[in-house]
Image: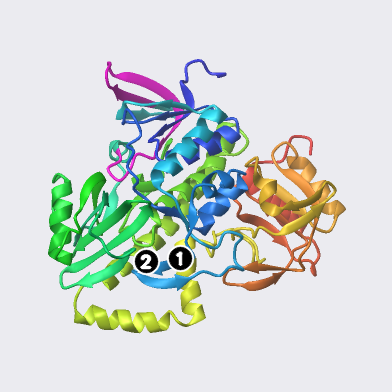
Amino acid sequence: MEDSGVDADVVIAGAGPTGLMLACELRLAGVDVLVVERLAQPTGESRAGGMHSRTLEVLDQRGILDRFTDIGVPQPVGHFSGLYLEFDEAESRHPYPLMILQTDIERLLEEWAVALGVRIQRSSEVTGISQDGAGVTVELGTAPGPTRTLLARYLVGCDGGRSAVRKLSGIDFVGTSATMTALIGDVELPELTEDYIWVRRCPTGDYSVIAFEPGWYRVIASEYDRVVDRDEPVTFERLRESLVRLAGTDFGMRSPRWVSRFSDAARQADRYRAGRVLLAGDAAHIHFPAGGQGLNLGVQDAVNLGWKLAAVVNGQAPESLLDTYHHERHPVGERVLHNTRAQSALARPGPHTDALRDVFGELLQFDDVNRQLCGKLTALNLRYPVDGDHPLAGRRVPDVDLKSAGGAIRMYELLHAARPVLVDLQGSTEVAAVADGWADRVDLVEATSLDDHWIVPDLDELPAPAALLVRPDGHVAWAASADEPLDTAALRAALATWFGPVRPGR
């Protein structure tokens, strides 16, 4: 490193999916990254069980999706509080959730991270933080061994719902406390006579039994009249007792591989940035795990933050760019907390909720209702507050087919290097002239769209634009309509806003 007094450009606390994805994003931009992890080894616990469309698109944007689809299983339907949703195959190349256990997700991401040159240091827990205008001093408790001190330019807490980084930084974690308790585990059920049990409602809660792997079942037992202290031990016997209370049997439950507990507590960091310290993933937000949104939310946090932090570290953009991370992702976290609170309420036992579920189920038969809720879960309809009047501004770019001088190519293949791309679809000399000022940071691609209209969630079909500027996270920073004069001033403003000032002499 240029500064021998700095141990890493960025230290990331936490080697879960969020921390590993962020580390990879930073390494793609040449940033030196050190991941510190409290645990000595990966837990081996299956935990989250899938990835939604937008996360699959993100992995496609980086050219590594096949690693996950090779071992995952597409699930053709989703759910909102146990009520089935149908996904629109026209909205994405990857419309269906991919059933894949978190252990596999973490393994694949860690393999990618190591190949990119990410350093990972385990048995290292963050115990102290101080910062100034030059960097962040991170104190680590290492086991075994003495306390160690690191100096980084930035620190990102991806260390879970009980984040030490968040607490040590004085960032408030506000929201609502638990009103129920659920136990979850992967076990053998030799006496189960059904292939699976999907959200069977009971007088005091509900339970599900889902086959994730041959011979193994995930049991989820939710009791809405019980709230336990979060420090109470989680045991296999308590999972058994909870299932018996709900189902009247334990189905011969045995051989637990993993047991855990969750609730409907919903909290969010009041700020995602405190100077040189940032938060992502569960460190920034926790919620009822309805619809399998948590892991996806964290990975998408990482992809939003990664290119921005890299641009600042590499001196290509002002530090103020980091403020857009909070401005864009905090409302997304709020949206997820809101819909998971709604799902928790809709899951409560009792005849009044039963009636509400019946009415809600009838509403889901309307395409617009189904589409709206699918958009919340998949994040395909997400739009960031980006300047510009074009309907694509702020939205995720669709993975359309293009034809360039080198042949056929997909839009997402242009994003494999995690660099911004200015796509000129009409061979405009004006676009090329403006792009020259950012040639060291932004890739210019001349191509034609093979489709006259693009399908965009919430907008249906949209005429293909004349040109568009796509951020490394796949969201559109600027776009020009084919039937209007090209606004080069707006393009220059977008380039400067997101990717720093024009090169000297341009």
The residue lying at 62 percent from left, 42 percent from top is 418
Residue 18 vs 451, above or below: the answer is above
Q: Is residue 144 magenta?
A: yes
Q: Give the magenta-colored segment's residue range.
A: 137-163
In this picture, residue 301 sits left or right of residue 260: right
Q: Amino acid at mark 1?
A: Lys
Please state if 204 lies on the left or on the right of 465 as rendered: left
Distance from the alpha carbon under mark 1 to that under mark 2: 8 Å
At mark 1, the secondary structure is helix
Residue at the disc numbered 1: 376
| x then y, percent, for residue 262 | 25, 53
Q: Amino acid at mark 2?
A: Asn
* Above or below: residue 182 compared with residue 247: above
The first of marks 1 and 2 along the sequence is 2
For residue 42, side relative to residue 237 (left or right): right
Of the pair 350 and 74, the residue shown nearer to us: 74
Residue labelled with disc 2: 339
Q: Quadrant of residue 360?
A: bottom left
CB-based contact (under 8 Å), mark 1 and mark 2 = yes
